[in-house]
Image (cartoon, grey):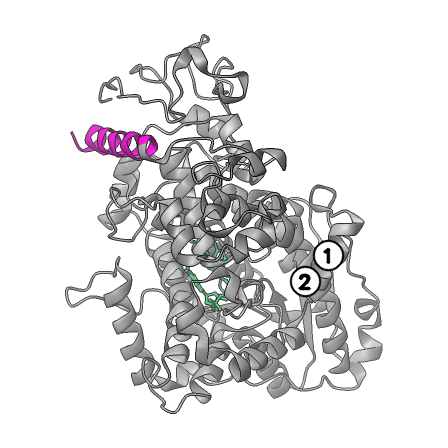
Amino acid sequence: MTPKRKLPYTDPTGIAPNKRSARSKPVVLVDDTIPTLNSKSTGPVERNSPEFDHSRPEERAGIVQRTFYPPEMSNERCAQYNANEIPRPIEELEGAIASTAQSRAKITTGNAVVFWFKRDLRIRDNKGLSLAGKKAREAGIPLLCVFVVSPQDYQAHLTSPARVDFELRTLAILKRDLAELDVPLVVETIVKRKKVPEYLTGLCEELGARHLFCNIEYEVDELRRETLLTKRCLEKDIDFSAVHDDVVVAPGRLKTGTGNQYAVYSPWFRSWIRHVHENPELLDEWETPGKNPPSARDKYEHLFDNHIPPAPENKKLGDEEKERFAHLWPAGEHEAMGRLSKFLNEKIGRYQAGRNFPASNSTALISVHHSAGTLAARMSVREARNVNNTKKLDGGNPGIAGWISEIAWRDFYKHVLAHWPYVCMNKPFKYEYTSIEWEYNDDHFDKWRNGQTGFPIVDAAMRQLNHMAYMHNRCRMIVASFLAKDLLLDWRLGEKYFMEHLIDGDFASNNGGWGFSASTGVDPQPYFRIFNPLLQSEKFDADGEYIRKWVPELRDVKGKAIHDPYGRGEGKLAAKNGYPKPVVDHKICRERALARYKAGIGRDTA
Ligand SMILES: Cc1cc2nc3c(=O)[nH]c(=O)nc-3n(C[C@H](O)[C@H](O)[C@H](O)COP(=O)(O)OP(=O)(O)OC[C@H]3O[C@@H](n4cnc5c(N)ncnc54)[C@H](O)[C@@H]3O)c2cc1C
């Protein structure tokens, strides 16, 4: 192990130690005195000492959830993935699909075809469902659908209660729509996530189904589960088909001239555009399944009777929250289509000019639908192209081209996740940044999450998140940068908080966004480019409209002082209304972050 050096420390509060109040006293977020699962020593060890077990704070802060996962992966193993020395979960799944293809093709149809819904909660333009429907129609047998509620998966994936509620509301709509096609939707709660494959094979056996279809999810656990299912199903004479649907272009299809994966968005995007132009069928709509034979109603009456369960105990919302989220985020694919058409008809032309300004209401507010799969990304790109004056995805109206390029970001981050699977195992894409010394300061983290940092743009954004389970993209970047660079808190604390609160929480996009902001991700932006929250605020919320909406204590602050009331002569008014002073000094923090990043990176590359 490389010896840890003492790190330069500058107090970011800018207050002399003897003048610090109890409020600014740092409190560790993790308890260093409790021995860890893999620690040999029993007493506390200095963070900078060579014996310090770096997995401890991560585990105690709940970043590495040891109930479900092993300790943090080593840099050596990340390097092995990058050197193609160990197979990636996506390669294992694709390998299992290919190696079983011949045997699976010989399986004759049984009494029914089953489709397993996951994060693809729609009937329209759903590839896996469409293929399942086609198989059933050709064999003249019914299509049956299933969704598994897995409380452990919700816990392991940090799914927010708002999102669980959205999914359950969507399932009720989906069940009703499928019933109109005489297709039942079974919604079953399986407490232990490891039991899901067994439940699915058991269900197929019980129903006499020999074909099970689903769409692929790109997180590691899910890819491994589907690999296992491919083999287990075959042992039971069931053909399990997992297909690419969540993205426009499947991961692994775009390669650089030297045959490598792209790790930078711009060249990847040019390649994505070229690929879709050359393969326009990628945007074609998948056929909606037809009606089941009339006998299905009677035969599967018990399946139609099945009810949508309430949210699991650990993901329940209060009554007021339930009402608020149902009002803000109506569920289901009809709502998604309605939102999409309204955006395309009324707003997309202004998208490029307005998308960075949080008060301008210029974006589609559609991410929850892409994320829960109530809307296919493919459908969004196709419909946007259809309202343009060219078939070129990167031409014509700049608003349309710009919007399509944002959806491409979503594809990009899924490609990154599939090719660099360790990002799903708590490691940064730039794994050599693992040794950066992060803070685990309770007080700072509390202020950040509650919108009490004294930086108006940061506080407005965090309050938007806490109220709406959503935050504008520009603000996501600002608060993420503030957490990682100004507070120097472990960026994974912020990543986790986002997942636990966003209704549109999506592992790949969230991880990608946090990696971008903390400079630990795929983006080539160097760590020394640090967002200045004041400049961001002045540039993207010049009139303070967004701040005034979310921070009522500052509603009466006039002019430019809204961005920094204590620094611009409105401190008295802010203090009278209970608005806090800045928790840190940005200039000092900037220097501290530069030193820490430099030291951390140096430590691992030394
Ligand atoms: C730190 C951070 C965390 C994020 N976490 C998530 C997340 O958990 N889930 C999520 O869906 N998005 C996430 N994003 C991306 C982005 O902020 C949201 O997708 C966007 O704000 C959604 O609003 P909209 O639907 O109005 O987007 P629009 O601007 O209308 O964009 C259209 C669609 O394109 C996709 N998209 C847009 N921007 C991005 C982007 N930067 N990365 C990936 N996809 C994008 C979304 O599906 C979005 O619905 C994150 C960004 C950052 C910086």
Magenta residue check for 228: no
* Residue 324's disc number: 1
User: Which residue reaches farthest bottom?
Assistant: 389
In the image, is residue 134 above or below residue 116?
Answer: below
> Which residue is nearer to you in this view: 427 or 297?
427
User: In this image, 253 relative to 63: left or right?
Assistant: left
> Which residue is nearer to you in this view: 603 or 238?
603
Please tell me how crowded label 2 is: few (under 14), some (14-19), or many (20+) other residues with Cα within 10 Å: few
The percent coordinates of residue 142 (x first, y second) are: 70, 79
Q: In the rendered view of the protein, which quadrant contains the C terminus?
A: top left
In the image, is residue 76 above or below residue 344?
Answer: above
Label 2 lies in ligand 1 vicinity (Cβ under 8 Å): no
Which residue occupies 39% across, 45% down?
A: 533
Q: Inspect this view and state whether residue 286 appears.
A: no
Q: Specify the amino acid type for callout 1.
A: Arg
CA–CA distance in space, label 1 to label 2? 6 Å
User: In this image, 434 relative to 577: left or right?
Assistant: left
Kindly check if marks 1 and 2 are in contact, taking CB atoms under 8 A apart as contact: yes
Q: Which residues are magenta?
A: 588-606
Q: In the rendered view of the protein, which quadrant contains the N terminus?
A: top left
Callout 1: helix, strand or loop? helix
> Which residue is nearer to you in this view: 523 or 572?
572
Which residue occupies 44% across, 67% down?
A: 355
Q: Inspect this view and state whether residue 327 appears.
A: yes
In the image, is residue 27 above or below residue 135?
Answer: above
Magenta residue check for 596: yes
Q: Specify the amino acid type for callout 2.
A: Leu
Q: Which residue is mark 2?
A: 328
The percent coordinates of residue 439 (x first, y second) are: 41, 27
Please tell me how crowded label 1 is: few (under 14), some (14-19), or many (20+) other residues with Cα within 10 Å: some
Which residue occupies 32% across, 65% down?
A: 252
The percent coordinates of residue 509 (x first, y second) are: 44, 56
